[in-house]
Image (cartoon, rainbow, N blue to C red):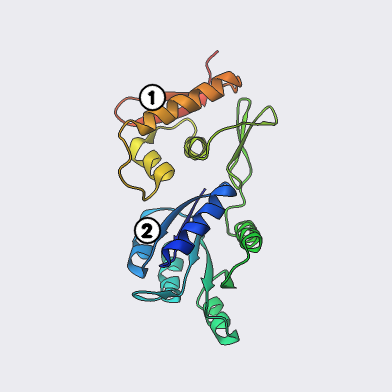
């Protein structure tokens, strides 16, 4: 699961990304209203962490556009603006939650989990294919009820394939899901990642295989034997 952080303080954004990574979330980071809007329009994020005091305006001004374009998205405002009126204005503008800085890490993670559980969010049942079960809400995989050990990027790859099981997922879509807005990713990085995930699934006898769709991408399907 990939979360967008809209925060212009580079150090704080990095700390948030590290916190979320430890909880199993991938992140993209931008520092302006313009870049935040472009990211939301280009990627299907389940949740956005949004600062208010950005170089090109108040983050709250993004909320109407975000709501119109992505009705199911969750937005948590994080701001040093802490008066009662500030909090009320943020919530009335369309935020799902409002936290004042500095934010306590465990509380932030709890607020994120709570936001994603709310009606209209992404509280989805697990996807089961053969012996593999994938919990979409937590980005966790199990084989016969036992956790599948994998890196964060391997889990993001598996999530993207599981969501479209039986259908080809393009190289571009997979790169976007796994690496997000990062740059300078080697062209063979995806191929190597697929190879490692294939081996993990084979070792656990998960009953699924990742097939290459020539010139398109990859497909996750039940093993034939």
Circle 1 crowding by C-alpha within 10 Å: few under 14, some 14–19, many from 20: some
Q: For the residue carrying disc 2, how many other residues have a C-alpha within 10 Å: few (<14), some (14-19), or many (20+)?
A: some
Q: CA distance from mark 2 to mark 1?
A: 29 Å
* Front-lying residue, 91 or 28: 28
Question: Pointer 1: what residue?
Answer: 212
Q: Position of residue 181 (x, y in %)?
A: 36, 51
Residue that numbered label 2 is attached to: 39
The answer to whether 220 is drawn above or below residue 124 in the figure is above
Above or below for 127 versus 53: above
Residue contact between numbered discs 2 and 1, judged by CB atoms under 8 Å: no
| Mark 2 or mark 1: whose residue is earlier in sequence | 2
Task: Give the residue drawn at x 52%, y 77%.
Answer: 80
Q: Position of residue 70 (x, y in %)?
A: 45, 61
- Specify the farthest residue to the top: 225
Residue 172: % across, % down: 33, 40
The percent position of residue 7, horizontal first and vertical second, equals 44, 66
Mark 1 residue element: strand
Along the line of sight, which residue is nearer the eye, 66 or 110?
Answer: 110
Quadrant (top left/top right/bottom left/bottom right) for the C terminus? top right
Q: Is residue 165 left or right of residue 43?
A: right
């Amino acid at each position: 699961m990939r979360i967008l952080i809209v925060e212009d303080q580079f150090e704080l954004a990095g700390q948030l990304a590290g916190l979320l990574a430890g909880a199993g979330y991938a992140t993209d980071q931008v520092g302006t209203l313009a870049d935040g809007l472009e990211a939301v329009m280009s990627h299907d994020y389940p949740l956005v962490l949004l600062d208010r005091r950005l170089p090109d305006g108040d983050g709250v001004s993004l909320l109407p556009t975000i709501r119109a374009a992505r009705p199911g998205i969750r937005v948590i405002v994080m701001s040093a603006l802490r008066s009662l009126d500030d909090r009320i204005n943020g919530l009335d503008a369309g935020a799902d939650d409002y936290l004042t800085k500095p934010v306590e890490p465990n509380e932030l993670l709890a607020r994120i989990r709570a936001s994603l559980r709310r009606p209209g969010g992404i509280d989805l049942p697990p996807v089961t294919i053969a012996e593999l079960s994938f919990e979409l809400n937590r980005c966790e995989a199990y084989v016969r009820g036992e956790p599948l050990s994998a890196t964060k990027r391997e889990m993001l790859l598996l999530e993207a394939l599981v969501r479209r099981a039986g259908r080809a997922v393009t190289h571009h879509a997979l790169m976007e899901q796994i690496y997000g807005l990062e740059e300078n990713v080697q062209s063979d990085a995806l191929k190597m990642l697929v190879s490692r995930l294939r081996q993990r699934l084979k070792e656990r006898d998960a009953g699924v295989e990742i097939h290459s769709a020539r010139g398109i991408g990859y497909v996750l399907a039940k093993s034939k034997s």
